[in-house]
Image (cartoon, grey):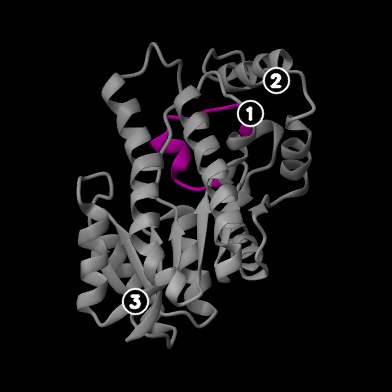
């Protein structure tokens, strides 16, 4: 039975680049997302580069039972998950009271419940194979975020869950890393309906650059990885900033472009 690295949300952005990075590093990868077409293109690309063709499984991780169906599909291919890369997720930009309730609940379902369910479902094989978990969080995890309240809260969960899990699993030889990128040039902005001034304050990093940094941090066994000097400074000082000031600053940054002020 071959050992594989399972990458979720692999149809674009950071997830796509993480799949490329792990495949380039010699891992056999399993890629999953909702778009079969995008997954097939990625599988063709990786195979053309001389790597083992990825196992591509198109499904919506937010659906009930998706984690079990995904792992069953991996097993039918004669593979076992050694490394899990949880990247699937999305965000919505706007005040919680004005955004559709169902969409915000769906965000929690994918960003939190689905990530937790898949991690717990895959842990037996990951522990047995002394592998690891790479969870994609965000610099949003380090403070509350008015204007994207639910999204920031989901990423805080991912960071907290990852750090605690890393501590629990350390004696077993399993590593868990929370990758916390800041603004990144991906399709996320469009999905989040995001035109945030954060993308003016901090130069967006390239998704491939973020993925390479995340993979290297994961291989080192880092518990938290924040790519980009400015992102590390902001993450490092978040806990030192008075909460009221942090709330006001984030609210202003998130709303500046939405209000059309441009300044």
Vertical order, 162 against 172 (above or below): above
Q: Count the labels in the image.
A: 3
Say whether residue 136 is visible: yes
**Cα distance in 3D space between marks 3 and 1:** 36 Å
Tell us which disc is closer to us: 2 or 3.
Answer: 3
Range drawn in magenta: 185-199
* Mark positioned earlier in the residue sequence (3 or 1): 3
Residue drawn at 34 percent across, 76 percent down: 80
Disc 1, SS: loop
Residue drawn at 40 percent across, 41 percent down: 111
Q: Which residue is mark 1?
A: 143
**Of 41 and 82, which appears nearest the observer?**
82
Q: In the image, 54: left or right of 231?
A: left
Disc 3, SS: strand
| The C terminus - image quarter | top right
Crowding at dot 2, Cα within 10 Å, few <14 / some 14-19 / many 20+, comes out as: some
Crowding at dot 3, Cα within 10 Å, few <14 / some 14-19 / many 20+, comes out as: many
- The question of residue 78 being in magenta is answered with no
**Cα distance in 3D space between marks 1 and 2:** 7 Å
Given contact means CB atoms under 8 Å apart, are the residues at marks 1 and 2 in contact? yes
- The question of residue 191 being in magenta is answered with yes
| The N terminus - image quarter | bottom left
Q: Which residue is mark 3?
A: 80
In the drawing, what numbered circle is on residue 246?
A: 2
Tell us which disc is closer to us: 3 or 1.
Answer: 3
Expressed as whole percent of the image width and height from the top left, the position of residue 32 reads: 31, 61
């Amino acid at each position: 039975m071959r050992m594989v690295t399972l990458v979720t949300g692999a149809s674009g952005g950071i997830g796509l680049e993480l799949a490329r990075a792990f495949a380039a590093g010699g891992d056999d990868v399993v890629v999953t997302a909702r778009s079969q077409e995008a997954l097939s293109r990625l599988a063709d690309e990786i195979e053309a580069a001389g790597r083992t063709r990825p196992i591509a499984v198109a499904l919506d991780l937010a659906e009930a039972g998706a984690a079990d169906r995904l792992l069953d599909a991996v097993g039918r291919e004669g593979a076992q998950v050694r490394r899990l890369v949880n990247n699937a997720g999305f965000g919505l930009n706007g005040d919680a009271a004005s955004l559709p309730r169902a969409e915000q609940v769906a965000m929690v379902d994918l960003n939190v419940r689905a990530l937790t369910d898949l991690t717990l479902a895959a842990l037996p094989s990951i522990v047995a194979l002394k592998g690891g978990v790479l969870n994609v969080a965000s610099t949003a995890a380090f403070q509350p975020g008015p204007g994207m309240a639910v999204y920031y809260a989901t990423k805080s969960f991912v960071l907290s869950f990852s750090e605690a899990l890393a501590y629990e699993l350390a004696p077993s030889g399993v590593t868990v890393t929370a990758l916390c990128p800041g603004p990144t040039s991906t399709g996320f902005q469009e999905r989040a309906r995001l035109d945030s001034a954060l993308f003016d304050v901090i130069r967006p990093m390239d998704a491939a650059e973020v993925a390479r940094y995340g993979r290297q941090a994961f291989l080192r066994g880092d518990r938290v990885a924040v790519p980009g000097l400015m992102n590390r400074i902001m993450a490092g000082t978040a806990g030192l900033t008075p909460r009221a000031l942090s709330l006001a600053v984030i609210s202003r940054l998130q709303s500046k472009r939405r209000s059309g002020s441009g300044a």
